Amino acid sequence: MRRDLHIKVILLAFAFALMISCSPKTHYKTLSFFFDGVPNPYKADSIARADSIRMAGSKETKTIRVVKSEYIFHPPYQEKECANCHNQGQMGKLLEPLPGLCYQCHESFGDQYQVLHGPVDAGFCTQCHNPHMSKNKFLLIRTGQNLCLNCHLSKDVFKNEAHSDIEDADCTECHNPHGGEDRFILN
């Protein structure tokens, strides 16, 4: 019975290894199932180039296809420095909770502003920013009013007299998205 278990584990490991190394398409499908932001090597508007990578704990260098796209990448993600943020031994679990992890590289907004925007104060950086890549500057998950109106109800925002004629203006033209000196976090 124990031998059967060993055989099943070995077969499962072999099947998994085949799935990962079989072809770039299979490799992409497998990785993107487990991880966010894996670049699609078959995207039509992408430019591919050869690059080399050395996996953690390995002396072997492997040449891979790297995709350049219209995305903006977070530098550690782009440089394949996953271990700067993720524990490699625990399936990519973060090394530290947010915002502490972000503040290892980025300056704490609590030191800059008297009043912090709710998500910033709560440490929910990923409420507005994608930690790997985005098509939007500052790695934003949305742009313009769509970013703010994802949390703030438009009926409440637009009933305010100060907002009566803003039309489709970007909220950050008047408000600092991270904090300010008053509760309206005005620039």
Image: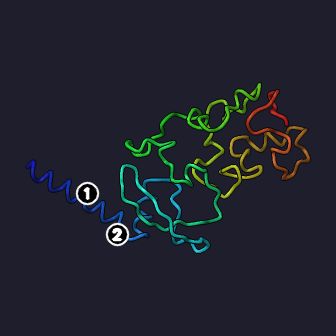
Q: Secondary structure at mark 2?
A: loop
Of labels 2 and 1, earlier in sequence is 1
Up/down of 127 relative to 23, above or below = above
Q: Residue furthest top?
A: 114
**Residue at 36% of width from left, 63% of height from top?**
20
In this picture, residue 94 sits left or right of residue 16: right
Circle 1 Cα neighbour tier, 10 Å, few/some/many (<14 / 14–19 / ≥20): few
Q: Secondary structure at mark 1?
A: helix
Q: Position of residue 77 (x, y in %)?
A: 55, 51
Q: Amino acid at mark 1?
A: Ala
Quadrant of residue 53 within the rendered picture:
bottom left
Q: Position of residue 159 (x, y in %)?
A: 85, 40
**Residue at 11% of width from left, 53% of height from top?**
4
Q: Which mark is residue 22?
A: 2
In-front residue for pair 165/148: 148
In-front residue for pair 175/73: 73
Q: Which quadrant would the C terminus be assigned to in this image?
A: top right
**Residue at 80% of width from left, 33% of height from top?**
185
The residue indicated by pointer 1 is: 13
In-front residue for pair 151/187: 187
Circle 2 Cα neighbour tier, 10 Å, few/some/many (<14 / 14–19 / ≥20): few
Spatial CA distance of label 2 from label 1 is 14 Å
